[in-house]
Image (cartoon, rainbow, N blue to C red):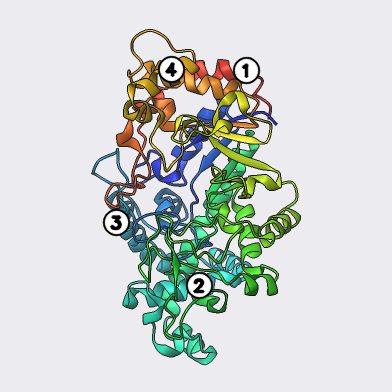
């Protein structure tokens, strides 16, 4: 398998409603990259995002993010009128995603749509709800309860926190219309995503999502499966992973799995989740793969570096459950010779070109050392862009990088279409032996550090958006030529 891919997130797509969405703009983007030979679209997960807008801290990892629902789709179904559609259009900046505007707008549109559901559509929603009963009902309950508890299920009324069956049944009856709101919301999301995925697949593009194993504390799946996590009688975490995701019972906490209980349950929670994810995407990158190997983390900084046999067992079960699907594990640099990591068990693993020139350097991140099991990136969603990284390097290290990629002469810092230094880095990846060479859209555009997706800045993360001027300025013929030259144009 020799492919080239683009990393770009759905919230970054152009659009009229304050954020990217599942709409014609997304289809146009997929058509654009496909036309120039790219056959992989790598995106962050499209599940509902959390309080910090991160797709990794959402209330559910099953529920799709309603901000991606296309109001034009609702209008064409007769669920809203033309005035509703116009009022939903965004008048702010086209360069950043406005989650607050989009979420409030879509919520209001769905409330109006509830009164316009036809009998035929009602049957389709009922069928969808039945097929997704294992998560949809609890997602709806959690969303309703969260409005009074700020997402913290330890603050739910006692019987509902403990999931008393009679209390849940009574709750559903009292909140019938609100439950219908979330069923319609998810039906609209899933039906639209299925169409977009089919469109991409039909023109030869596979969608690969970057996901994480860890669940945030404010999450419906944790509420539904408390016995699998280290929680106290009050429902609060006894301890939590950090790893850039907070600590304690904050919205960003990642409660610790109890490995023995996961094993006793044959990993049903995680396996069910992966089976579901593979209905949404053609492939997955597990970004915190180290949690597979030390699920019960006790190291001070929240990192999980010690190999556990159960991690390998879980990977094999996921592969068995989802034959023929793409599964890629995040690679982490070895701390010492005795440490065993996810990529050591075989299969595809990630490499980030920037790590070759880090301190300490990682020899495996040099393109001349890539093998056919490698999925290589010029930059990642949680690192600086390639151009931004070049700017932040010490001059001597930058000279080494430029020499390595064969760049000479002035102008390494030029951005946009003329960003020849980043083009040279991309060429090294595309020419290498790696299985998939992935270039984030910011690097294709020649953008700097202000366009990072995640820089641990709650105010600015997950907001970068593309505009058509930027897309039209990408030197796609250059990349198309490389894809053909280095035989990455297979479908």
Residue 153 placement (x, y as % from top left): 41, 77
Which residue matches tag 1? 484
The residue pinned by badge 2 equals 222
> In which quadrant will I find the C terminus?
top right
**Residue at position x 46%, y 32% from top?**
354
Q: Would you say residue 94 is visible in this rendering? A: yes
Tally of marks: 4
Q: Residue furthest bottom?
A: 166
Q: Are the residues flagged by discs 3 and 1 in contact, CB closer than 8 Å?
A: no
Within 10 Å of the Cα at label 1, are there few (<14), some (14-19), or many (20+) other Cα atoms?
few
Q: Nearer the viewer, mark 1 or mark 2?
A: 2
Is residue 184 shown above or below 90? below
Residues tagged 2 and 3 counted as in contact (Cβ below 8 A): no
Circles 4 and 2: CB distance less than 8 Å? no
Q: Vertical placement of 90 versus 416: above or below?
A: below
Which numbered disc flags the more N-terminal residue, 2 or 3? Answer: 3
Percent position (x, y) of residue 327? 65, 47
Tell me which label, 1 or 2, sits earlier in the chain. 2
Quadrant, the N terminus: top right
Residue under label 4:
402
Q: Earlier in the sequence, mark 4 or mark 2?
A: 2
Within 10 Å of disc 2 (Cα), the crowding (few <14, some 14-19, many 20+) is many
Viewer-nearest residue: 462 or 422 = 422
Q: Mark 4 or mark 1, which is nearer the start of the sequence?
A: 4
Which label's residue is closer to the chain start, 4 or 3? 3
**CA separation, marks 1 and 4?**
24 Å
Using the image, tell me which numbered label, if any, was put on residue 100.
Answer: 3
Q: Residues within 10 Å of mark 4 (few under 14, many from 20)?
A: some
Q: Is mark 2 on a helix, strand or loop?
A: helix
């Amino acid at each position: 398998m020799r492919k080239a891919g683009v990393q770009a997130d759905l919230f970054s797509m152009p659009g009229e409603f304050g954020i990217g969405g599942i709409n014609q703009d997304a289809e146009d983007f997929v058509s654009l990259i496909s036309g120039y030979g790219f056959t992989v679209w790598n995106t962050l997960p499209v599940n509902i995002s959390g309080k910090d807008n991160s797709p990794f801290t959402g209330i559910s990892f099953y529920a799709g993010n309603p901000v991606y629902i296309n109001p034009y789709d609702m209008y064409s179904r007769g669920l809203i009128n033309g005035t509703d559609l116009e009022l939903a259009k965004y008048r702010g900046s086209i360069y950043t995603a406005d989650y607050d505007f989009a979420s409030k707008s879509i919520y209001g549109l769905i409330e109006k749509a509830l009164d316009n559901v036809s009998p035929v559509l009602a049957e389709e929603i009922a069928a969808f709800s039945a097929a997704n009963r294992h998560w949809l009902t609890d997602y709806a309950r959690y969303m309703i309860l969260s409005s009074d508890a700020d997402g913290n299920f330890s603050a739910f009324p006692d019987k509902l926190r403990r999931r008393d069956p009679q209390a849940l049944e009574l709750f559903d009856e009292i909140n019938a219309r609100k439950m219908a709101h979330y069923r319609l919301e998810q039906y609209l999301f899933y039906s639209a995503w299925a169409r977009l995925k089919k469109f991409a697949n039909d023109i030869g593009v596979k969608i690969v999502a970057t996901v994480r194993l860890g669940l945030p504390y404010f999450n419906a799946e944790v509420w539904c499966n408390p016995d699998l996590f280290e929680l106290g009688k009050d429902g609060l975490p006894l301890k939590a992973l950090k790893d850039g995701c907070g600590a304690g019972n904050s919205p960003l906490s990642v409660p610790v799995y109890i490995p023995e209980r996961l094993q006793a349950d044959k990993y049903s929670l995680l396996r069910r989740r992966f089976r579901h994810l593979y209905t949404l995407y053609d492939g997955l990158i597990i970004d915190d793969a180290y949690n597979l190997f030390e699920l019960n983390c006790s190291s001070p900084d929240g990192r999980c570096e010690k190999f556990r046999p159960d991690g390998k067992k879980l990977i094999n079960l996921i592969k068995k459950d989802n034959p023929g699907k793409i599964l890629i594990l995040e690679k982490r640099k070895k701390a010492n010779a005795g440490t065993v990591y996810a990529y050591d068990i075989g299969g595809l693993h990630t490499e980030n070109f920037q790590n070759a020139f880090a301190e300490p350097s990682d020899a495996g991140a040099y393109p001349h050392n890539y093998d056919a099991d490698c999925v290589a990136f010029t930059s990642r969603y949680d690192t600086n862009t390639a151009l931004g990284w070049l700017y932040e390097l010490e001059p001597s290290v930058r000279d080494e990088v430029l020499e390595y990629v064969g760049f000479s002469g002035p102008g390494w810092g030029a951005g946009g279409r003329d960003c020849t230094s980043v083009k040279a880095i991309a060429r090294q990846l595309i020419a290498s032996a790696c299985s998939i060479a992935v270039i984030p859209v910011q690097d294709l555009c020649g953008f700097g550090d202000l366009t990072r997706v995640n820089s641990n800045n709650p105010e600015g993360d997950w907001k970068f958006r593309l505009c058509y001027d930027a897309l039209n300025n990408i030197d796609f013929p250059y990349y198309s030529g490389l894809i053909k030259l280095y035989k990455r144009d297979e479908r």
